[in-house]
Amino acid sequence: MQDHTFTLIVAAAGIGGTLSGIVIGHFLTRSSQHRQWSRDNRKEEFKEVVSAMSRYIVEHMSYTASQGSDLPQSRQAYLEAMKAAHIVLCGCVYIHGDLGKLAIPKRFVEIMEHFRSSGTEFDDPADKAGTLLEEIIAIARKG
């Protein structure tokens, strides 16, 4: 009778160990997948921010340079790029804290104001914008 009891205890421990291993493995996999999903979303948002800001800068320079030609499509492209950049900067969920800590939206608005006041002299604001974009890319590469 004792042999059967010992066998049942060993079998129950084996089954319990297997089931607990499956449960632990499930939670570890789920946690790892969630972290990867979060990293992917952060990467995508950083990409959208850099792309929208870059497009806005380029459209601003193009619009400023073509003001003498009075092309409505240039103004429209500039306004669309401006709206898109502001929407992306305000709509970031996963990187909102990173952008806020470094005051990226505020600094970007200041740079764009500098662009507007500089007329066609783009060197200084373009350098500042490039530095800001490099800073954002560096943050994105960290994690």
Image (cartoon, rainbow, N blue to C red):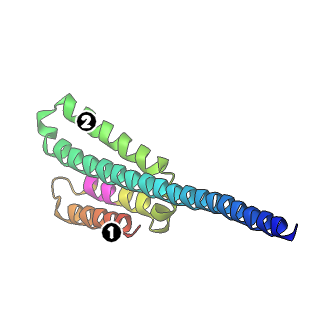
In the rendered view, would you say 22 is above or below 65?
below
Q: Say which residue appears at 65% left-offset and 58% top-offset.
A: 23
Q: Is 52 in front, or is 120?
A: 52
Residue to which mark 1 is pinned: 138
In the rendered view, would you say 66 is above or below 120?
above
In the rendered view, would you say 134 is above or below 88?
below
Q: Residues within 10 Å of mark 1 (few under 14, many from 20)?
A: few
Q: Name the image quarter holding residue 27.
A: bottom right
Drawn side of residue 23 relative to residue 95, left or right: right
Percent from the top left, x then y, of residue 85? 36, 46
Residue to which mark 2 is pinned: 77
The mark closer to the camera, 2 or 1, is: 1
| Distance (Cα) linking label 2 and label 1 | 28 Å
Percent from the top left, x then y, of residue 45? 40, 52
Instruction: Answer whether residue 67 is magenta in the image.
Output: no
Q: Residues within 10 Å of mark 2 (few under 14, many from 20)?
A: some
> Could you say whether the residue bearing mark 2 is in a helix, strand or loop?
helix
In the rendered view, would you say 85 is above or below 136?
above
Label whose residue precedes the other's in the sequence (2 or 1) = 2
> What is the magenta segment's predominant secondary structure?
helix
Q: Name the image quarter holding residue 73.
A: top left
Magenta residue span: 111-116
Q: Is 61 in front, or is 44?
A: 44
Q: Say which residue appears at 12% left-offset and 38% top-offset.
A: 68
Q: How many marks?
A: 2
Q: Name the image quarter holding residue 64.
A: top left
Q: Amino acid at mark 2?
A: Ala
Q: Amino acid at mark 1?
A: Ala
Instruction: Classify the position of the N terminus by image quarter.
Output: bottom right
> Could you say whether the residue bearing mark 1 is in a helix, strand or loop?
helix
Question: Please, which residue is most extreme toward the left here?
Answer: 69
